[in-house]
């Protein structure tokens, strides 16, 4: 089977010749470790990833967001501003990938500021005109293709507003929340249509709406603000490509909304974080309706376990959540600096050893 055939089989809850491999993400320091040991190949090549991703081109016309941070007492020399105008204050040790979020509208309660706030120019053709070409190139090489649109609504909206204020606004200022969500939704719908028209195999959506003990917001709030909007994004993609698969990502334990995610058209659940979600239970309860992506723990096994522990976890996943297919194996998040090279090698070797179905 080709990589694409393998991934499509798994997403259709069938059993391919071997378990498909999702890609690995790396923090800067962990990528240095990889590059030092991998013999000059890319992570996708080394880990035999069956999927390639495409995303928007960088903006050529960034808005002037720096004015929003004047008077906040920020070290402007360490401030980086992303596509959405969210400030990231880097650690003094710039080798670390963690930054302090600084929200541009954290001090405003004027609805007009949210109406007028500049959002990315995703609607401009130059940002997406490469989608079809890049998808076709990956398909020609036999790979499945994913269109990246994670941090779809919730995360980008709260980052603009500020987390605590955003949670309060969900109860006290629904006008602000609806404004932010609807403005972001407009170009997410357009993005879903563009990815589907480019013939991607998978639309990758998601927001971290949960923590390890459960939801960050109540299921009722998720239903009020996010469920209908996520449904519209999925509907937009399926109007263009009816058979497109849709993955939803949320770190932590979002099991309270699994049924409703499947109801609105999600077909792949990610990342199935084993520290707080039982992969065996998830497979038993949802394996007839969803495929699964992830389930290799990045909190304990990969950073602090032995190579033997990594091998055992891969074997266990294949015997449980991977049984009879419907599974794409991958770590549940990016590889952190604490993960030793020996464990990355053990992960790759163990998938080679236990990943064949036939």
Image (tube, rainbow, N blue to C red):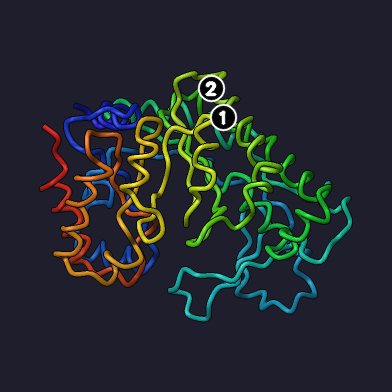
Q: Circle 1 is placed at which residue position?
A: 234
Q: CA distance from mark 1 to mark 2?
A: 6 Å
Question: Looking at the figure, which quarter contains the C terminus?
Answer: top left
Mark 2 crowd level (few <14, some 14–19, many ≥20, 10 Å Cα): some
Residue at 22% of width from left, 33% of height from top?
A: 324
Residue in the foreground of this view, choosing between 331 and 254: 254
Q: Is residue 329 above or below residue 274?
A: above
Residue 158: horizontal and vertical position, in percent? 68, 56
Q: Is residue 255 visible?
A: yes
Q: Circle 2 is placed at which residue position?
A: 238
Residue at 87% of width from left, 51% of height from top?
A: 111
The reply to whether dot 1 and dot 2 touch (C-beta < 8 Å) is yes
On screen, residue 276 versus residue 231, left or right, reads: left
Q: Residue 101 shows which numbered tag?
A: none
Count of numbered badges drawn on the protein:
2
Q: Secondary structure at mark 2?
A: helix
Q: Is residue 80 above or below residue 189?
A: below
Question: Looking at the figure, which quarter contains the N terminus?
Answer: top left
On screen, residue 251 versus residue 331, left or right, reads: right
- Quadrant of the rendered image containing residue 337: bottom left
Residue 146: horizontal and vertical position, in percent? 42, 36
Residue in the foreground of this view, choosing between 38 and 279: 279
Residue 59: horizontal and vertical position, in percent? 61, 46
Q: Secondary structure at mark 1?
A: helix
Residue 239: horizontal and vertical position, in percent? 57, 18
Residue in the foreground of this view, choosing between 37 and 351: 351
Q: Is residue 335 above or below residue 135?
A: below
Mark 1 crowd level (few <14, some 14–19, many ≥20, 10 Å Cα): many
């Amino acid at each position: 089977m080709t990589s694409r055939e393998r991934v499509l089989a798994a997403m259709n809850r069938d059993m391919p010749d071997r378990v498909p491999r999702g890609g690995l993400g790396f923090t800067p320091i962990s990528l240095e470790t990889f590059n030092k040991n991998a013999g000059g190949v890319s992570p996708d090549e080394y880990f035999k990833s069956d999927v390639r991703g495409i995303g928007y081109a960088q903006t050529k016309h960034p808005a002037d967001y720096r004015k929003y941070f004047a008077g906040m007492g920020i070290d402007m020399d360490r401030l980086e501003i992303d596509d959405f105008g969210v400030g990231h204050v880097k650690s003094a040790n710039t080798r670390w990938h963690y930054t302090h979020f600084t929200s541009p509208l954290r001090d405003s309660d004027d609805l007009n500021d949210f109406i007028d706030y500049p959002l990315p120019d995703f609607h401009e053709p130059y940002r997406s005109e490469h989608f079809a070409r890049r998808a076709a190139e990956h398909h020609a090489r036999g790979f499945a293709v994913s269109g990246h649109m994670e941090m779809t609504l919730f995360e980008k909206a709260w980052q603009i507003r500020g987390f605590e204020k955003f949670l309060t606004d969900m109860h006290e200022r629904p006008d602000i929340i609806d404004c932010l969500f609807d403005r972001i939704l407009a170009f997410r719908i357009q993005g879903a249509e563009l990815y589907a028209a480019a013939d991607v195999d998978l639309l990758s959506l998601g927001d971290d709406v949960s923590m390890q003990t459960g939801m960050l917001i109540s299921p009722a709030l998720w239903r009020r603000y996010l469920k209908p909007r996520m449904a519209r994004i999925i509907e937009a993609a399926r109007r263009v490509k009816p058979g497109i698969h849709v993955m939803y990502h949320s770190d932590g334990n979002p099991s309270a909304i699994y049924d409703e995610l499947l109801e609105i058209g999600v077909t792949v659940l990610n990342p199935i974080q084993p520290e707080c979600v039982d992969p065996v239970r998830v497979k038993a309860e949802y394996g007839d309706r969803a495929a699964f992506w992830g389930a290799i723990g990045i909190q304990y096994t990969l950073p602090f376990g032995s190579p033997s522990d990594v091998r055992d976890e891969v074997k266990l996943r294949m015997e449980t959540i991977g049984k009879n297919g419907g599974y794409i194996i991958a770590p549940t998040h990016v590889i952190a600096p604490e993960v030793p090279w020996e464990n990355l090698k053990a992960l790759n070797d163990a998938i080679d050893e236990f990943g064949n179905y036939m």
